[in-house]
Image (cartoon, grey):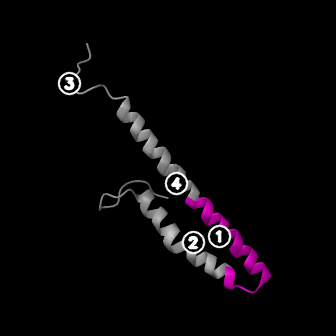
Amino acid sequence: MTYGRHPGGIPQLYLSMLKYVTVVLPYRALRWTLDFNPKQRFYRKCRVWMTLGAIREFFSLAHANSRRGAAELTNQPPTGCENE
């Protein structure tokens, strides 16, 4: 997974999260529900749960990044203060 910004200024993490929620998860869930082979159904069920775990990780990373950014902002000295 790459980190950084998309040329439009949107963090890559958010674009990946959007893709997993809107494209990957529905596709894998549909394939899981429509498969009749028990071995394939189990495999696809595991893939759906793996995708849900990845989405949760995206949310955790996004939350950690926002908290880290807020903490960095609060630890900055006020503008105009000189270190003596």
Specify the amino acid type for callout 2: Leu
Indicate which disc, 2 or 1, sits on the residue closer to the N terminus.
Answer: 2
Left or right of 12? Residue 58 is right
Pointer 4 and pointer 3: residues touching (CB < 8 Å)?
A: no
Neighbor class of circle 1 (other Cα within 10 Å; few <14, some 14-19, many 20+) is many
Identify the magenta region: 33-55
- Badge 1 is on which residue? 48
Q: Is residue 11 magenta?
A: no
Left or right of 1? Residue 54 is right
Q: Looking at the picture, does residue 1 appear above or below residue 37?
A: above
- Residue 25 - label: 2
Neighbor class of circle 4 (other Cα within 10 Å; few <14, some 14-19, many 20+) is some
- Badge 4 is on which residue? 59
- Where residue 35 appears, as percent x and y from the top left, is 70, 85
Circle 3 sits in a helix, a strand or a loop, which is it? Answer: loop
Indicate which disc, 4 or 1, sits on the residue closer to the N terminus.
Answer: 1
Specify the amino acid type for callout 3: Gly
Circle 1 sits in a helix, a strand or a loop, which is it? Answer: helix
Q: Residue at x 52, y 54 (%)?
A: 59
- Where residue 15 appears, as percent x and y from the top left, is 42, 63
Marks 4 and 1 sit apart, C-alpha to C-alpha, by 17 Å
Circle 4 sits in a helix, a strand or a loop, which is it? Answer: helix
- Badge 3 is on which residue? 80
- Where residue 27 appears, as percent x and y from the top left, is 57, 78
Indicate which disc, 3 or 2, sits on the residue closer to the N terminus.
Answer: 2
